[in-house]
Image (cartoon, rainbow, N blue to C red):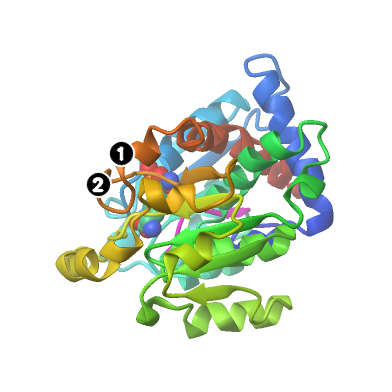
């Protein structure tokens, strides 16, 4: 059974096909085939969501399937039924699972115990659907001819702020998988942690990132300046301290101007203007944040179609 739990679950050789499919779904919205016809996919969410939930619900529907949203707290999982039994039972009813939760090990356990594809819709560790949609957003601009991976190869992404969060982890893994380079700027104790380092090692990417406490150094020569919220879901108790220590890593107009002159600004959203990014950067025409959000739909439809195809 195929799953998308981390960025490398689609091999580099498969990514071009995935990007082409996303482009076709985007161009032919409302007129394309419905490879999920007759299927029901469950969305199990233990955290809030606007983009991921809505793009999956709409995407499954547009592919001919039926999305079934399950608040993790409303099913027996929330009252102590095991992850394994939940996976076994839901596998008897539905054709796939999209899961947003805290522990990354929970999506791995669902995938191991169940018999249907599992898509990681964000864990505390990784957010691969966002990374694929972001890479597609970059490639649309850098490879208009359609050789998407060639368009990404050798490009540099600079990630500023909470460099220990799921988005930073995912971009370190994703950038390496796509042939890009990545520099991160954050406080010294927000450097990549042991869980990510172990994963990079297993994937053959050990040490392949730059980490600095100087945001100007990170953005030098960057094709993309990326940031994320300072207080990820589940970290609310640390809000005050995080706002204090992360303040020097805000993406200001001056920092953005220190990247390449044609650099893009990207953010997975939701954004907090005046915190991790200043309003003048969000308003810059090179901020492509709503294209990223839209592309969640098209790329996830490509992922769903690929995983449904692999089940046959
Ligand atoms: N970027 C993202 O995953 O947004 P949501 O939390 O709204 O799904
Ligand atoms: N790092 C953020 C991403 C939200 C899409 C969080 O986990 O809350």
The magenta region covers: 117-123
Mark 2 vs 1, N-terminal side: 2
Residue highlighted by disc 1:
279
Count of numbered marks: 2
Q: Position of residue 196 (x, y in %)?
A: 54, 77
Label 2 and label 1: CA atoms lie apart by 6 Å
The answer to whether residue 199 is left or right of residue 142 is left
* Label 1 secondary element: helix
Q: Which residue is mark 2?
A: 274
Crowd rating for badge 2 (residues with CA inside 10 Å; few <14, some 14–19, many 20+): some
The residue located at (51%, 35%) in the rendering is 286
* Quadrant in the picture for residue 33: top right
**Which residue occupies 69% across, 54% down?**
155
**SS class of the residue under badge 2?**
loop
Is residue 238 something one can see in this rendering?
yes
Residue plotted at (42% across, 38% down): 51
Q: Is residue 100 magenta?
A: no
**Position of residue 122 measured from the top left corner of the image (x, y, whole percent):** 46, 56
Q: Which mark is residue 230?
A: none
Closer-to-camera residue (68/166) = 166
Q: Position of residue 247 (x, y in %)?
A: 26, 63
In this picture, residue 3 sits left or right of residue 170: right
Whether residues under marks 2 and 1 lie with C-beta atoms below 8 angstroms apart, the answer is yes
């Amino acid at each position: 059974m195929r799953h998308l739990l981390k960025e490398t679950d689609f091999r580099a050789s498969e990514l071009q096909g995935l990007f082409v499919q996303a482009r076709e779904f985007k161009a032919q919205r409302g007129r394309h085939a419905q490879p999920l016809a007759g299927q029901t996919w469950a969305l199990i969410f233990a955290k809030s969501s606007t983009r991921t939930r809505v793009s999956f619900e709409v995407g499954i529907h547009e592919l001919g399937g039926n999305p079934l949203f399950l608040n993790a707290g409303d099913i027996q999982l929330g009252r102590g039924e095991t992850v394994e039994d939940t996976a076994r039972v839901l596998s008897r009813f539905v054709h796939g699972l999209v899961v947003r939760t805290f522990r990354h090990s929970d999506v791995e356990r669902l995938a191991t115990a169940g018999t249907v594809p599992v898509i990681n819709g964000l864990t505390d560790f990784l957010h691969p659907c966002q990374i694929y949609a972001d890479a597609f957003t970059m490639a649309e601009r850098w490879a208009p001819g359609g050789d998407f991976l060639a368009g990404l190869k050798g490009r540099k992404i600079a990630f500023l702020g909470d460099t220990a969060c799921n988005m930073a982890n995912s971009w370190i893994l994703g950038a390496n998988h796509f042939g890009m380079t990545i520099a991160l700027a954050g406080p010294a104790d927000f450097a990549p942690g042991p869980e990510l380092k172990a994963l990079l090692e297993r994937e053959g990417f050990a040490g392949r990132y730059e980490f600095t406490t100087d945001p100007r150094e990170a953005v030098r020569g960057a094709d993309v300046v990326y940031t994320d919220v300072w207080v990820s879901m589940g970290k609310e108790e640390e809000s005050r301290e995080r706002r204090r220590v992360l303040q020097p890593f805000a993406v200001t107009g001056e920092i953005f101007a220190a990247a390449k002159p044609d650099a893009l600004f990207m953010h997975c959203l939701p954004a907090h203007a005046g915190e991790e990014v200043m309003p003048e950067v969000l308003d810059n025409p090179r901020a492509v944040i709503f294209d990223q959000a839209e592309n969640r739909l098209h790329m996830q439809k490509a992922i769903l179609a690929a995983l449904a195809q692999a089940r046959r």
